[in-house]
Image: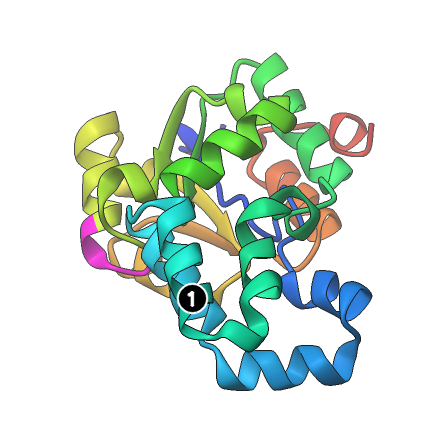
Amino acid sequence: MGGISAVVFDIGNVLIEWQPEKYYDRTIGPDRRRAMFEEVDLHGMNELVDQGADFRKTIYDTADCYPHWRDQIRDWHDNWLSLAQPAIAPSVALLRTLRARGVTVFTLTNFGIGSFAVAEAHYTFLTEFDRRYVSGHMGVTKPSNDIYRMVEEDSGVMPGELLFTDDRAENIEAAAARGWQTHHFDGPDGWADRLVAEGLLTREEARA
């Protein structure tokens, strides 16, 4: 199977769309959304959650610092599933087909402890990995070298036998620097083609 012992999926923009700006464009309009994102480092706030900070407290504390945006910032917590949606169905199908073929499948994701708990209760496929490496629980986020080393040490899989897909170039580059095999995700079709090329799926399975 092309020397691959485990396939590693990112989640955001690979298995679940993660574009919070779209939520705010719908709810407050593009102009107000741009103004809020320029004033408030919402992605930096989310990075703290991904590093293990408390989901609700981190967001509510940020909201309290910007009273004129308080309700909108709290939505990042209170309406989180409306920000993290929809599932990317063809990618989920690839995950499940790999597992049905007996291929070991991991996730390595920047995700908070509380937000991941919300997500897995809604997106049941998040419970289906053989191993789950969630940054909030690990206390470190991609693309830190440490997070990739921790996956190697915990799984016992050699770097060259891990095939990792992620939508962010810096995360792919950090994995490749450790010797992982990588695929820069830009859509399910390209990822399906790579899995076929590695001999992990047949063309028919990849397009099912």
**Residue sticking out furthest to the front:** 67
Amino acid identity at mark 1: Asp
Q: Is residue 32 above or below residue 114?
A: below
Question: What residue lies at 68% left-to-right and 38% top-to-bottom?
Answer: 91
Visible in this render: residue 73? yes
Name the chief secondary structure element in magenta. Answer: loop
Secondary element under disc 1, as helix, strand or loop, is: helix
Q: Position of residue 178 (x, y in %)?
A: 24, 54
Q: Is residue 151 left or right of residue 30?
A: left
Answer above or below: position of 7 versus 17.
Answer: above
Residue marked by disc 1: 64
Magenta range is 142-146
Residue 117 locus on image (x, y percent)? 47, 30
Residue at image coords 81%, 28%: 204
Which residue lies at the image location 21% right of the left edge and 57% below the top edge? 145
Does residue 112 show up magenta in the picture? Answer: no
For image coordinates 63% across by 86% down, the residue present is 35
Does the magenta-highlighted stretch encompass residue 144? yes
Q: Place residue 106 in its image quadrant.
A: top left
Observer-nearest of 14 and 78: 78
Using the image as rendered, state which of residue 140 and residue 83 is in the foreground: 83
In front: 60, or 142? 60
Compared with residue 25, is residue 175 higher up or lower down, i.e. above or below? above
Specify how the rendered protein is coloured: rainbow
Q: Counting other residues with Cα less than 10 Å from the Cα at mark 1, is it few (<14), some (14-19), or many (20 or more)? A: some
Q: Quadrant of residue 64?
A: bottom left
Image location (x, y in percent) of residue 95: 61, 29
Res 142 seen here:
no
